[in-house]
Image (cartoon, coloured by chain):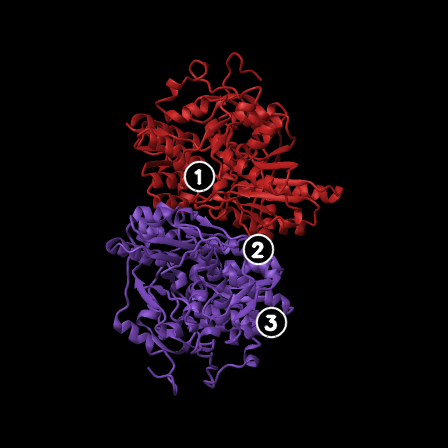
Chain colours: A red, B purple
Amino acid sequence: MTVKTAKEIPYKIYLSENELPKYYYNVRADMKVKPAPLLNPATHEPLTKEQMEPIFCSELIDQELDNDTQYIEIPEEVRDFYKMYRPSPLVRAYCLEKKLDTPAKIYYKFEGNNTSGSHKLNSAIAQAYYAKKQGLKGVTTETGAGQWGTALSMACAYLGLDCKVYMVKVSYEQKPFRREVMRTYGASVTPSPSDTTAVGRRILEAHPGTTGSLGCAISEAVEVATSNDGYRYVLGSVLNQVLLHQSIIGEETMTAMDKYGIKPDLIIGCAGGGSNLGGLIAPFMGKKLRGEEDYRFIAVEPASCPSFTRGKYMYDFCDTGMVCPLAKMYTLGHDFIPSPNHAGGLRFHGMSPILSELYHQGLMEARSYEQTSVFEAAEYFARCEGILPAPESSHAIRAAIDEALKCKETGEEKTILFGLTGTGYFDLTAYRQYNDHTMTDYIPTDEDLAKGFESIPKFPGNEL
Amino acid sequence: MTVKTAKEIPYKIYLSENELPKYYYNVRADMKVKPAPLLNPATHEPLTKEQMEPIFCSELIDQELDNDTQYIEIPEEVRDFYKMYRPSPLVRAYCLEKKLDTPAKIYYKFEGNNTSGSHKLNSAIAQAYYAKKQGLKGVTTETGAGQWGTALSMACAYLGLDCKVYMVKVSYEQKPFRREVMRTYGASVTPSPSDTTAVGRRILEAHPGTTGSLGCAISEAVEVATSNDGYRYVLGSVLNQVLLHQSIIGEETMTAMDKYGIKPDLIIGCAGGGSNLGGLIAPFMGKKLRGEEDYRFIAVEPASCPSFTRGKYMYDFCDTGMVCPLAKMYTLGHDFIPSPNHAGGLRFHGMSPILSELYHQGLMEARSYEQTSVFEAAEYFARCEGILPAPESSHAIRAAIDEALKCKETGEEKTILFGLTGTGYFDLTAYRQYNDHTMTDYIPTDEDLAKGFESIPKFPGNEL
């Protein structure tokens, strides 16, 4: 290992393809207290593999349940796909540092360097691969903002799998370009609720003219997967398996930093369902859990949907429609509806069970920001670093800038690492609001939150 | 130099930042017959530096007129900016080769890896730099599809220069997202024709309700530059200086190929004004001109706007509004209006004087494709290579695929290199037409062309 001096650190550290990780890192193996298992909502007993088989791909269930294996091999076919856009660059934000006039050293791992525009592709190709290997015809999923649906469409096109995406109707209409990207990759995209499923028809009858919700789209996607031979349902966040696949982000980051002798003091990521943050911090958290090194981790969420900062650590449904299993997580209640917020990927009422347990143990911090302040950071970043960031990612930028400004006050030369999960090409309606000064902020009142908490199921052992 | 065997060639060859070119390569220095000079339309005499001073930045005029200096240093500040997104990757299209089942080896230089979404940024930062160095307050320009305007906005934001973009009104309305990107980078974007200029007001009076044209937007941008202290006008294609800046594409490509002992047989690029193709082929053409090596070069243009394949090599105005100098180039006549074609960047009636002269000397080939066939190639490429290409770039993809299929027939193991100039995130209206099977093709008739040729100015020495 050649340790270079700070002066020699390039703008972008690209690993070679030989340095692409060969294994996913499973942080659960190093956790003393494991994340709580998913429960069957009917019995409140842990879900068995058999119960999951009709919904999920077999090998992915194994990964979901595996709390012990530290390293899980990345199949060669998946690694070949990764080579099309990975290793992704680790960027030294020299221009941002200069503009902030801070002694802090800022790095970001950029995951927007692929057509899906985000880190979602890392898990999409893994999930599609296991579906293909199992001999399935296709997969179904839901999508809101559209990043996950796009990533899955790309992975399925590559492997020759059918891909059925249920897209929340309001997004289907408001984001026609996202829909076209998925269609270009051969996916069928259905606005949800639709008349293609029993649950969709029921919802349409009960709520004519509804513009849909993620919960409803999940219900339709699950119905199509379970009622069609050769199909399974796949999900882009929250689940343990997804965080496992996303660990490639953190592994590459650590390899690149090790090469140059860099040690981050602070690791920052935006948190919706937790897939990006969980992936970025995984190997660093592993070192912390094993007592080898210490880091501060900060999860950043929107003030309008504050699962970590104002939620309850309880079992709750992952979806509004209550068709999914119960997960123990920081939740605002599955009936909690965040106000319209453009960071679509962060509008989830719950949070990854792994991250929830780590946060509960005090191994991680969390904070929230209002939208306008997030877009202010996004614009500042875009103008000096040249990348138009996604609103989701901009939450991490906001926190990184604030930490760098603190260093300016104190004179501390901290090393800050944050995850830049994606680009904002499909979020320009939100940028327009910011440019026009018509963007508004919204923080739920305690009464709003109390209403959401009422929807959390009550059963023995699941008390506040 | 380590020459590697084909087996070891990675998916993406990234040069290190130390390998970023330090000089632009000026192909004119190696041309025996130089491109014809720009003429003053009033006198039909070559334009002097003095005549250009009120419009263009001083150092850029020197570059425009310099037919002799082979290498021109890239300023350090410009190289620093380049480091944010360069060196750009040279990709071995392993997946495309496999899907085509061709013995050909296909490479593409990907220039869409930055927020402007295209190679335009390479010249934008250079032009903005020289404007800043001259102590100017800002620059003005026009934009149609919006790639150039976006690139210039980014460069100006970085350097703290004011940027006034005149955007063709129909694009301003149809591409609101492009407009928002420019605004996010702090540019002022005015739909053209506008009432902010005398020429705009004249046009609005004569043609109420007009949706504008590039020619009109150029006229407005030039007026604003010449009538405001501390402003100059900048252009994103056609000019010699622009091809000079874009030579960095070809230089990086050659360095990467040399490292792995690769020699392209065929070099392919789309051609609108010629900036991308001219930049990609520059150092290769240099070797050919100096008799050191031989390559085939292919310019690909839309059948709806066939400057090379059906145009005349004559002096003509660069703009419809006849405010620009006369350039000797392959032209369809400045009054030629191509049918609506989504490859906005290729809808120019003329062509770079440098490329025109090279084509005229038989050093380069040209061919044209219809739009539907181009989008077919774009979809095919996206599904296996994972990148959503811009419609402009997809013309080169079409030609590369056709050449690879020829190799499949003949068994020849040719090495094909093409330029992937940009991404298609802002072209999804066109993709939607393709997906919906509502895309149409249009080839101008000989009568259509004859009408355009009539607008070419006639004067002694400028005969067919």
Q: Position of residue B13 (x, y in %)?
A: 46, 51
Q: Position of residue A123 (x, y in %)?
A: 44, 35
Q: From the image, state whether disc 1 or disc 2 is nearer to you.
A: 2
Callout 3: SS = loop
Give the alpha-carbon distance from disc 2 to disc 3, as whole Å. Answer: 40 Å
Where B53 falls versus A129 (above or below)?
below
Residue reaching furthest right?
A: A410
Chain to which the residue tagged by mark 3 belongs: B
Give the alpha-carbon distance from disc 1 to disc 2, as whole Å. Answer: 31 Å
Residue at the spot of label 2:
B18
Per the rendering, the mark at residue A121 is: 1
Quadrant hosting residue A293 = top right
- Residue B355 makes an appearance in the image: yes
Nearest the eye: A37 or B169: A37
Looking at the image, which residue is at 52% across and 75% down?
Answer: B66
Residue reaching furthest front?
A: B2
- Residue A170 makes an appearance in the image: no
A17 with respect to A286 (left or right)? left
Nearest the eye: B281 or A434: B281
Q: Position of residue A29 (x, y in %)?
A: 53, 23
Residue reaching furthest bottom?
A: B460
Give the alpha-carbon distance from disc 1 to disc 3, as whole Å. Answer: 49 Å
Query: Of the residues shown, which amino acid type is indicated by label 1?
Result: Leu
Per the rendering, the mark at residue B456 is: none
Per the rendering, the mark at residue B228 is: 3
Q: Are marks 1 and 3 on the same chain?
A: no
Q: Position of residue B374 (x, y in %)?
A: 32, 56
Callout 1: SS = helix
Query: Of the residues shown, which amino acid type is indicated by label 2?
Result: Asn
N-term-proximal mark, 2 vs 3: 2
* Circle 1 Cα neighbour tier, 10 Å, few/some/many (<14 / 14–19 / ≥20): many
Q: Are marks 1 and 2 on the same chain?
A: no
